[in-house]
Amino acid sequence: MSELSQFKAEFFKALAHPLRIRILDELRKGEVSVNDLGSRLNVEQSNLSQQLAVLRNRNILAARKDGQNVYYSVRDPQLFDLLDVARKIFNNHLIDVKDLLSQLVVARR
Amino acid sequence: MSELSQFKAEFFKALAHPLRIRILDELRKGEVSVNDLGSRLNVEQSNLSQQLAVLRNRNILAARKDGQNVYYSVRDPQLFDLLDVARKIFNNHLIDVKDLLSQLVVARR
DNA sequence: CCACAATATGAGAATATATGAATATTCATG
DNA sequence: CATGAATATTCATATATTCTCATATTGTGG
């Protein structure tokens, strides 16, 4: 089915942004307020708010309002598994690149 | 580190496209030629070639040339684990949405 | 060498995304 | 209720992606 791949792509698109990745990494420890996030990540307030909205709209984050604060958390902890697998793949890549570089160095002698 | 999140985002960006997802799903069975992919996925040749290039440039796919054919394969099988985890998360989402919908239906009575 | 098949690349229009600045909304408190 | 803090939204602009059409490249067989 082609719609499914469309949905999957949307999901990955939500993750395809440096700030959004950093947000998710911060949320590994649990719920965090927007304010906290802002000071930890040191980004423009509106930018943060918009990237949070992207993740919220894709149902990746849950928002809980308490007073004037809004606390965000990751809906499905399996997301962290996903990020971990991604990290592994990523590390393999880096090793590949290192191998490639050392081969180049050898070849140049 | 902020560069790492940049790299991760690039990685997810590579996956954030319906056709590229379909390509990867086709490659679960193993190496496939561009020609085969084209007929299986039923897309424009140049479009396919460009999306293959995206995955190749991100080191996600390997290309092997044999005669006039080029055979593509997934470099790291862990990528399929990643797609599987994504599918699980995705299914949970759908359940969430279903729950939400049924609640709305109940609430409307 | 020619013609053809398989694949890649480039240019350009259409669309989408990112981001900062300004503004709006919501809530708590004096 | 006026003010201020926390968050969201809107808007304009810059940049990036996608896709199609045209063209290039590379290998094969006659």
Image: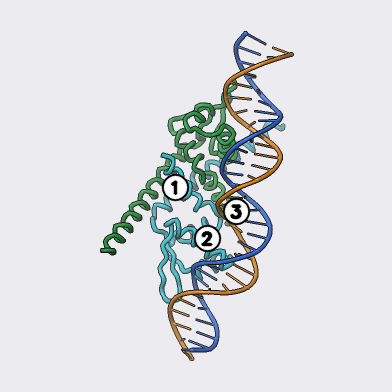
Chain colours: A cyan, B green, C orange, D blue
Q: CA distance from mark 3 to mark 2?
A: 18 Å
The vertical placement of B4 against B37, above or below, is: below
Q: Are both tags, 3 and 1, on one chain?
A: no
Question: Crowdedness of circle 3 by 10 Å Cα count: few (<14), some, many (20+)?
Answer: few
Q: Secondary structure at mark 3?
A: helix
Q: Are both tags, 3 and 2, on one chain?
A: no
Residue A51 is labelled as 2
> The disc labelled 2 sits on which kind of residue?
Gln
**Left of A66 or right of it: where is B19?**
right
Say which of A83 and B97 sits in front.
B97
Taking the spot 48% from the left edge, 49% from the top edge, the residue there is: A10
Q: Secondary structure at mark 1?
A: helix
Which quadrant of the rendered structure holds the N terminus of chain A?
Answer: top left
Sequence order check, earlier mark of 2 and 1: 1
> The disc labelled 1 sits on which kind of residue?
Phe
The vertical placement of B20 against A44, above or below, is: above
Say which of D26 and A83 sits in front.
D26
Residue B19 drawn at (x, y percent): 50, 39
Which quadrant of the rendered structure holds the C terminus of chain A?
Answer: top right
Q: Which of the chains bears the disc numbered 1?
A: A
Taking the spot 49% from the left edge, 42% from the top edge, the residue there is: B18
Foreground disc of the pair 3, 1: 1
Name the residue that disc number 3 marks: B3
Q: Which of the chains bears the disc numbered 3?
A: B
